[in-house]
């Protein structure tokens, strides 16, 4: 055990997880690579949990942060803040939500917390619809709407949460159905559920479930849900903390795969926009955002430094068409990984869109989840010079692949080769 690992264990909670048998201290990064304290270089296919969106040490972002820090670091939302207003204007336009208002937070958890506050206040209801296998953060209220046992440490809750079918396409009672039948069955389940309860405040859903293993429903499910929700006056919250900013390649926001009946009432974001800086936020229709009748400010949300980083990062993303790069390079990477998966008895499915890819592992000859294999592949990939993540419901048997959106084709091929070798090492 390293000295730093020993010190970490002495002062950190027991539940604060670390990857790897020999935990990794990352000291610096550049582009799509990072280095550890021993000088080892790794290709980064996880980006600090989908957060290093454009590149490590992106010059445009580091320059913006440095210049803003040299002027003023902090003021709070009690004062006018030019970088915050400029970033809010850009996000409001990009969101697709009419008459949008934007409130900045410091994390995705806090963004979802704020969305729940808005929805329950607007609707005068503490009932929330959430998806099975979902994850929305680690605050008390976010945990209470998380449909993932591994990330739900308490059953106590300020909300009454009702869980809906549909977030996982290939498991569960409707997995055998075709896409159209699957959507119809999930809508019927939602209709039936609403016949047994008081009217909920909102449905919150990740268009692609992140911690749940990059699972998603057929396109159009949430549009079909929206028809039911609208009849009952129930709001739709799209949790875009992991799916936003073009990561899926096909769409800028995940909700756009389900946009037949318009944008969500509330959209939450975080992670990639700050490229590692602590930025989250909520976009909502003006009447929903303005429904609070008491003071609500943020000390650190909208910090001049993090807003400068967000502006520079978003500009780089759009000017270099990183959404298009995610579509092109991600498409090639998914096909390469599917070819590799076809040769392994451990791989049940390779799924995803753009640079948001999941490899689900099972025990050979069965459909039973294989978290031991996932942990072994994580270790083997690290030994080969590649960092990946893992997740997947309560069994943690999915490898999560989400590199910076500037990933090149040679880097994608290099990472696929390392993954192929890591999968071979576990059978």
Image (spheres, rainbow, N blue to C red):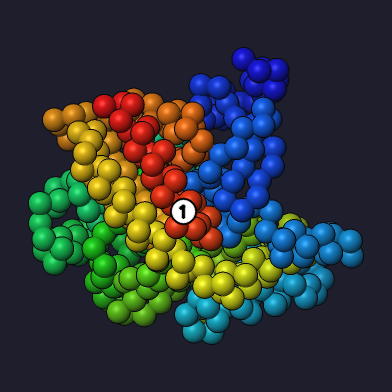
Q: Quadrant of the C terminus?
A: top left
Extreme residue in the top direction: 1
Q: In the image, is residue 257 above or below residue 63? A: below
Residue wearing tag 1: 410
The percent coordinates of residue 296 (x first, y second) are: 68, 64
| Residue at the (13%, 30%) spot, across then down | 365
Q: Does residue 259 lie above or below 60 as drawn?
A: below
Residue 73 appears in the rendering: yes
- Total marks in image: 1
Q: Position of residue 149 (x, y in %)?
A: 37, 36
Give neighbour class at mark 1: few <14, some 14-19, many 20+ (Cα, 10 Å). Answer: few
Q: Residue at x 55, y 81 (%)?
A: 93
Q: Nearer the viewer, residue 318 or 212?
A: 318
Within the image, what quadrant is residue 334 found in?
bottom left
- Drawn side of residue 299 relative to residue 207, left or right: right
Quadrant of the image occupied by residue 178: bottom left
Coordinates of residue 25 in the picture (x, y in percent): 65, 31
Foreground of the two, 89 or 345: 345
- The residue sitting at 65% across, 50% down in the picture is 30
x and y percent of residue 350 in the render?
Answer: 28, 48
SS of the residue under disc 1 = helix
| Residue 293 visible in this rendered orientation of the protein | no
Image quarter in which the N terminus is found:
top right
**Residue occupying image coordinates x 64% and y 66%:** 313
Outermost residue toward the right? Answer: 71
């Amino acid at each position: 055990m390293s000295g730093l690992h020993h010190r970490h264990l002495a002062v950190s909670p027991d539940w604060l997880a670390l990857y790897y048998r020999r935990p990794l201290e990352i000291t610096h990064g550049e582009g799509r690579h990072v280095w550890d304290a021993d000088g080892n270089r790794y290709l980064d296919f996880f980006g600090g949990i989908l957060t290093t969106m454009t590149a490590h040490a992106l010059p445009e972002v580091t320059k913006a942060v440095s210049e803003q820090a040299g002027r003023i670091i902090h003021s709070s939302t009690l004062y006018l803040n030019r970088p915050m207003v400029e970033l809010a204007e850009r996000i409001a336009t990009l969101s697709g939500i009419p008459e949008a208002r934007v409130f900045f937070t410091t994390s995705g958890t806090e963004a979802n917390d704020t969305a729940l506050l808005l929805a329950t206040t607007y609707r005068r209801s503490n009932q929330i619809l959430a998806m099975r296998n979902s994850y929305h953060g680690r605050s008390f209220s976010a945990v209470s709407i998380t449909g993932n046992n591994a990330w739900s440490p308490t059953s106590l809750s300020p909300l009454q949460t009702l869980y809906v079918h549909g977030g996982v396409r290939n498991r569960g009672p409707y997995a055998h159905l075709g896409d159209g039948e699957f959507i119809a069955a999930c809508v019927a389940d939602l209709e039936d559920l609403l016949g047994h309860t008081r009217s909920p405040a909102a449905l919150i859903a990740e268009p692609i479930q992140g911690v749940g293993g990059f699972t998603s429903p057929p396109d159009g499910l949430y549009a079909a849900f929206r028809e039911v929700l609208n009849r009952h006056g129930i709001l739709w919250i799209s949790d875009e903390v992991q799916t936003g900013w073009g990561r899926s390649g096909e769409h800028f926001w995940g909700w756009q795969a389900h946009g037949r009946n318009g944008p969500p009432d509330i959209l939450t974001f975080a992670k990639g926009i700050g490229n590692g800086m602590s930025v989250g936020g909520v976009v909502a229709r003006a009447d929903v955002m303005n429904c609070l009748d008491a003071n609500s400010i943020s000390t650190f949300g909208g910090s001049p430094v993090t807003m400068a980083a967000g502006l520079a990062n978003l500009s780089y993303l759009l000017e270099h068409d990183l959404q298009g790069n995610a579509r092109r390079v991600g498409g090639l990477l998914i096909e390469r990984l599917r070819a590799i998966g076809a040769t392994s008895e451990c791989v049940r499915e390779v799924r995803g869109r753009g640079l948001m890819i999941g490899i689900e592992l099972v025990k050979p000859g069965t459909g039973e989840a294989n978290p031991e294999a996932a942990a072994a592949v994580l270790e083997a990939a690290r030994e080969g010079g590649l960092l990946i993540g893992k997740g997947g419901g309560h069994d943690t048997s999915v490898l999560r692949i989400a590199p910076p959106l500037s990933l090149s084709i040679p880097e994608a091929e290099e990472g696929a080769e390392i993954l192929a070798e890591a999968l071979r090492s576990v059978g």
